[in-house]
């Protein structure tokens, strides 16, 4: 069974930084796009940032210039570095990845990690 496990969430003051990690485990051949999504209370889930296996990235406008996404293909891990955090960044952040196995392509979601930006 393929799993994604996130870590690195927590409480941080406005202007602070956090680094989220998401590690994949299980049996698979390859991971294509990996991404971070977030959902705040009462709001729709939104894509925050994504990165392809080759390193191409895209970000939602509200985090451009503040967040960076990277991945270590050898470790099957994706990272989200969040700087200059704002209260409106408060949300549950979930990792998503596109996998291929010998017989299928499929998406997997992590369980989510809470990020709270508050003074």
Image (cartoon, grey):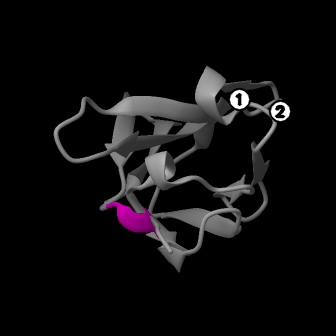
How busy is the neighbourhood of tag 2: few (under 14 within 10 Å), some, or many (20 plus)? Answer: some
Disc sitting over residue 39 in the figure = none
Q: Which residues make up the magenta segment? A: 112-116
Q: Secondary structure at mark 2?
A: loop
- Residue 63 in the image: state x and y as whole percent: 66, 35
Q: Nearer the viewer, residue 51 or 82?
A: 82
Q: Is residue 38 left or right of residue 69?
A: left
Q: Residue furthest left?
A: 42
Q: Give x and y (percent) for residue 53.
A: 74, 34
Residue at 46 percent of width and 46 percent of height = 88
Reply above or below: 52 against 90.
Answer: above
Q: Nearer the viewer, residue 11 or 32?
A: 11
Residue situated in front as seen by the camera: 28 or 98 = 98
Query: What mark, if any, has residue 55 been given in the picture?
Result: 2
Residue that mark 1 sits on: 52
Quarter-of-image position of residue 32: top right
Give me the residue at 46% from left, 58% from top: 27
Q: What residue do we see at 40% from left, 43% from top?
A: 38
Residue 91 seen: yes
Q: Tell me: 68 left or right of 117.
A: right
> Secondary structure of the magenta portion, mostly?
strand
Residue at the farthest front position:
119
Residue 23 image offset from top left, x and y in percent? 56, 65
Q: Residues within 10 Å of mark 1 (few under 14, many from 20)?
A: some
Element on which disc 1 rests: loop
Identity of the residue drawn at 48% across and 54% down:
87
Q: CA distance from mark 1 to mark 2?
A: 5 Å
Dividing the picture into quarters, in which one does residue 43 lie? top left
Locate the N terminus and report the quarter of the image it occupies.
Answer: bottom left
Is-magenta flag for residue 60? no
């Amino acid at each position: 069974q393929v799993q994604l496990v996130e870590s690195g969430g927590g409480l941080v003051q406005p202007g602070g930084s956090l680094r989220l990690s998401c590690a994949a485990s299980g049996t698979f051949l390859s991971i294509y796009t990996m991404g971070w999504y977030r959902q705040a209370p009462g709001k729709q889930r939104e894509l925050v940032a994504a990165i392809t296996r080759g390193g191409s990235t895209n970000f939602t406008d509200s985090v451009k210039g503040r967040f960076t996404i990277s991945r270590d293909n050898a470790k099957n891990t994706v990272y989200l570095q969040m700087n200059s955090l704002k209260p409106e960044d408060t949300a549950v952040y979930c990792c998503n990845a596109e996998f291929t196995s010998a017989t299928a392509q499929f998406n997997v979601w992590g369980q989510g990690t809470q990020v709270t930006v508050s003074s």
